[in-house]
Image (cartoon, rainbow, N blue to C red):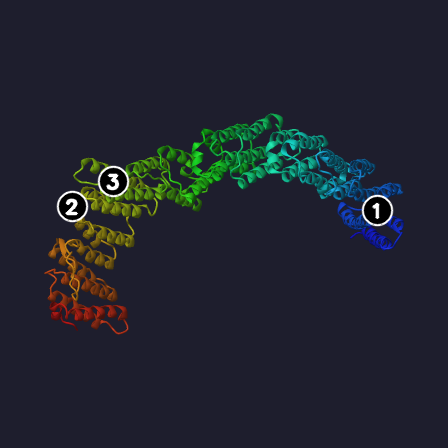
């Protein structure tokens, strides 16, 4: 606290205490008024900042409030009319006017007092103080004291409104004048001081908005024009920005709607330094909030036409308006058009026509990040504000043209937002037109790659950002849907034409396409559409499978690391499904495609082994292929076993070959014939088994070959482990009736394993393998009580 302020505060507190002491005694009112005049004289200073002056004003206000209460309580002992005249003889104008307002407002509170004359007298007398700070606080005091005393009956309402507006106009003039006082080097200091004082001026508009008997027509015809005229005439940037913001915030929503055209027209006549963006967006946000609070609010289309016309006038009347301000206003107008009348797409189209025209004017000029951000916000306005993001599909080409006029990074960002909205709301895309339009909006995600990454020598397909984009794009494909499976197929076919434009990124999207197509075929199977006796149905389903094959082959042409394995998996899934629906020739072709990819591109030995196990699993489940095309099945399984025997590592060879043995031993569980109910107390009978393929000789050959491979393994522990696995596999065939897997053969295996264990030194023996072997022997022993054949197996 400055020394000047400390001294003034000390004087004020002292004089207030003396004033109160005099008021508490009889017949000492004049002495009290003298003390009052003394502390009011402290308000005459020029040495304080507005903040410091306000601290002093608060103390003075409290002191005068005490005096006001005393005068009200002691009336009519102290005749207020005489006292009102008396205080006007005070020596200095500041004490005189404060005392005049204090006594005058008490006088106004008395019934039958001449309120109009007192109001007119006080407002005129305040003109005597033209110092900006002192005058502002004096008139603020007048506003505070008269706040609850102004008459609002039908006869006096006009006078009260005129009183408030006059006070507002005079305060605004004082406030603006403050900017032009002092040396030009202190301009920034004065600007700061003015912003500290702005609430004093705005309080008049707040009071005006609180008058209850004002309707929107009266406001439109009498109040607002006077206020706007003063705002325009003052030509001060700070005043215009602040006061228009106050108008937007304090008057009711209905008033804002009814005076929209007048308000917006005024903004076109403001100082060029005023931020139109700030003013217009504040109004738009207020109106949007009004609509959200009153969801059933009805407005005419003319309401939005005012905004559209305003945008058109901006170009002609404000040619120097910064581009970022222009596009910020466009974004706000776009939002309010969507929120108030979402079904009227023409309004939004007109906005993007202006945006496109303005951006073409800027073409070739450098743009900063702020401007690009406003372009992005404008493009996202329809995406984020329509209740259904599919509504953007109803917009005409101007939206797309404006989107494609932006930089690739900005286009990608908008495209990702479109995908996010679609995915978040799970909107189904059901027509070819919708598919084409959405792919048009997200076309930037399908381009060949990021130029910047190419310049750095990086692979665009491996970029984390690109991978995220493709993941979302793959999820989006699941939104393409039709209850008619073949209409759904056409949507997928159409999407592939768009996805194929980017040969690099199809590795992320084509597998999803194949997955969806397989689901479509399963759906046809579930609804019993696939009838092999119906040539039309068969041809339609074959066409889907052919499309799947084409899609996988196009994917295979990519040189990415994991593509071959993915293509093998997709071919095997398609083969399995083709077998299930009875199209065994199609299933055979998909298996052949898998073998071709295996031979050409699967080079890692561990991956080869995993792929072979998958092929064996799929082939073993192809019952229709076995029963309907045994020759083709034999070709496939023979080739599979051959692949297994050529694996690089001996353990992989051994396991692949003994697993392949199951391809010559396929048994189907026939659950349909097991319909007889089990009698009480009886154990349930096992389901009857139908042998689809039993080739005892080839099974034994596979087991013997795997045994030779295991025996040739140099690692004794690995060899022993394989022997135990082959023993377990042999027991399976022994149980299920393979006549060539005899007791003698199993006894020989057990003896071979035991001899190998005996030959190992105690330090080299693998305890895990020993435990596995012992569990097998225990199983054989337990089976002996059930199946007498096991009793002839010699256990060591």
Question: SS class of the residue under badge 1?
Answer: loop
* Front residue of this view, candidates 28 and 139: 28
Quadrant into which the C terminus falls: bottom left
State if disc 2 and disc 1 touch (CB < 8 Å). Answer: no
Farthest-out residue, left: 739
Q: Gap between marks 3 and 2, in whole Å? A: 19 Å
Mark 3 or mark 2: which is in front? 3
Question: SS class of the residue under badge 2?
Answer: helix
State if disc 3 and disc 1 touch (CB < 8 Å). Answer: no
Residue 76, labelled with which disc?
1
Between discs 1 and 2, the one toward the N terminus? 1
Percent of width and height locating residue 302: 55, 28
Q: Gap between marks 1 and 2, in whole Å? A: 121 Å
Percent of width and height locating residue 747: 14, 68
Residue on which disc 2 sits: 632
State whether residue 448 appears in this view: no
- Above or below, 510 against 436 in this view is below
Percent of width and height locating residue 648: 25, 55
Percent of width and height locating residue 73: 80, 50
**Snapshot quadrant of residue 593:** top left
- Above or below, 220 against 781 in this view is above
Question: SS class of the residue under badge 3?
Answer: helix
Between discs 1 and 3, the one toward the N terminus? 1
Disc 3 crowd, CA 10 A, few/some/many (<14, 14-19, 20+): many
Identify which residue is drawn at 24% across, 59% down: 651
Residue on which disc 3 sits: 545
Residue 574, labelled with which disc?
none
Identify which residue is drawn at 17% across, 40% down: 532
Disc 2 crowd, CA 10 A, few/some/many (<14, 14-19, 20+): some
Identify which residue is drawn at 16% across, 59% down: 677
């Amino acid at each position: 606290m400055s020394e000047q302020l400390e001294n003034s505060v000390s004087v004020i507190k002292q004089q207030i205490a003396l004033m109160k002491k005099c008021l508490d005694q009889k017949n000492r009112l004049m002495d009290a008024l003298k003390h009052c005049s003394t502390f009011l004289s402290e308000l005459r200073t020029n040495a304080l900042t507005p903040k410091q002056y306000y601290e002093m004003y608060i103390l003075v206000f409290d002191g005068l409030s005490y005096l006001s209460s005393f005068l009200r309580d002691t009336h009519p002992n102290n005749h207020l009319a005489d006292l009102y005249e008396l205080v006007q003889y005070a020596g200095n104008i500041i004490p005189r006017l404060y005392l005049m307002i204090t006594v005058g407002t008490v006088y106004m509170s008395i019934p039958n007092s001449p309120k109009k004359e007192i109001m007119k007298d006080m407002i005129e007398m305040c003109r005597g103080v033209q110092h900006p700070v002192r005058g502002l606080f004096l008139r603020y005091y007048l506003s505070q004291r008269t706040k609850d005393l102004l008459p609002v009956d039908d006869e006096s309402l006009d006078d009260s409104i005129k009183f408030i507006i006059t006070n507002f106009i005079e305060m605004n003039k004082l406030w603006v004048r403050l900017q032009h006082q002092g040396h030009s080097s202190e301009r920034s200091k004065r600007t700061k001081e003015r912003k500290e004082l702005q609430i004093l001026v705005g309080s008049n508009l707040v009071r005006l908005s609180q008058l209850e008997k004002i309707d929107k027509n009266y406001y439109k015809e009498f109040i607002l024009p006077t206020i706007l005229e003063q705002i325009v005439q003052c030509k001060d940037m700070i005043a215009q920005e602040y006061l228009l913001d106050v108008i937007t915030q304090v008057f009711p929503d209905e008033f804002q709607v009814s005076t929209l055209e007048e308000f917006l027209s005024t903004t076109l006549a403001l100082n060029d330094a005023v931020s139109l963006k700030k003013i217009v967006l504040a109004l738009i946000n207020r109106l949007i909030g009004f609509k959200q609070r009153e969801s059933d609010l009805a407005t005419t289309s003319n309401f939005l036409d005012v905004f559209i016309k305003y945008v058109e006038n901006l170009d002609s009347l404000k040619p120097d308006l910064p581009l970022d301000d222009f596009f910020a206003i466009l974004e706000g107008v776009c939002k309010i058009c969507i929120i108030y009348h979402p079904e009227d797409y023409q309004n939004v189209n007109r906005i993007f026509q202006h945006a496109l025209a303005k951006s073409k004017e800027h073409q070739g000029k450098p743009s900063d990040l702020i401007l690009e951000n406003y372009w992005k916000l404008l493009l996202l306005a329809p995406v984020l504000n329509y209740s259904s993001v599919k509504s953007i599909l109803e917009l005409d080409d101007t939206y797309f043209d404006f989107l494609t006029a932006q930089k690739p990074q900005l286009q990608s960002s908008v495209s990702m937002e479109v995908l996010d909205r679609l995915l978040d709301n799970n909107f189904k895309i059901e027509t070819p037109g919708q598919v084409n339009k959405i792919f048009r909006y997200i076309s930037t995600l399908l381009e060949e790659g990021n130029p910047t990454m190419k310049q750095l020598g990086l692979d665009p397909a491996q970029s984390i950002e690109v991978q995220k984009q493709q993941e979302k794009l793959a999820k989006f494909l699941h939104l393409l849907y039709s209850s008619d499976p073949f209409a759904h197929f056409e949507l997928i076919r159409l999407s592939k034409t768009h996805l194929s434009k980017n040969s690099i990124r199809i590795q992320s999207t084509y597998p999803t396409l194949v997955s969806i197509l397989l689901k479509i075929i399963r759906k046809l199977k579930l609804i019993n559409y696939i009838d092999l006796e119906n040539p039309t149905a068969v041809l339609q389903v074959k066409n889907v499978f052919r499309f799947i094959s084409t899609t996988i082959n196009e994917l295979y042409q990519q040189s990415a690391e994991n593509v071959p394995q993915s293509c093998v998996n997709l071919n095997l899934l398609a083969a399995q499904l083709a077998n299930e629906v009875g199209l065994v020739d199609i299933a055979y072709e998909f298996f052949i495609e898998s073998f071709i990819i295996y031979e050409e591109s699967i080079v890692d030995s561990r991956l080869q082994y995993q792929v072979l196990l998958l092929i064996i699993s799929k082939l073993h489940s192809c019952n229709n292929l076995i029963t309907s095309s045994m020759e083709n099945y034999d070709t496939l399984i023979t080739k599979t076993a051959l692949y297994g025997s050529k694996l690089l590592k001996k353990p992989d060879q051994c396991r692949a070959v003994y697993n392949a043995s199951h391809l010559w031993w396929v048994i189907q569980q026939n659950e349909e014939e097991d319909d007889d109910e089990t009698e009480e107390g009886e154990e349930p009978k096992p389901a009857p088994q139908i042998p689809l393929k039993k080739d005892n000789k080839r099974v034994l050959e596979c087991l013997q070959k795997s045994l030779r491979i295991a025996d040739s393994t140099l690692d004794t522990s690995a060899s022993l482990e394989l022997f135990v696995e082959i023993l377990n596999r042999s027991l399976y065939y022994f149980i299920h009736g393979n006549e060539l897997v005899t007791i003698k053969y199993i006894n020989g295996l057990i003896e071979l394993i035991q001899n190998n264990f005996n030959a190992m030194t105690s330090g080299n023996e693998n305890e895990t393998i020993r435990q596995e072997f012992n569990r097998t022997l225990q199983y054989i022993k337990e089976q002996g009580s059930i199946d007498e054949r096991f009793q002839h197996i010699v256990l060591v």
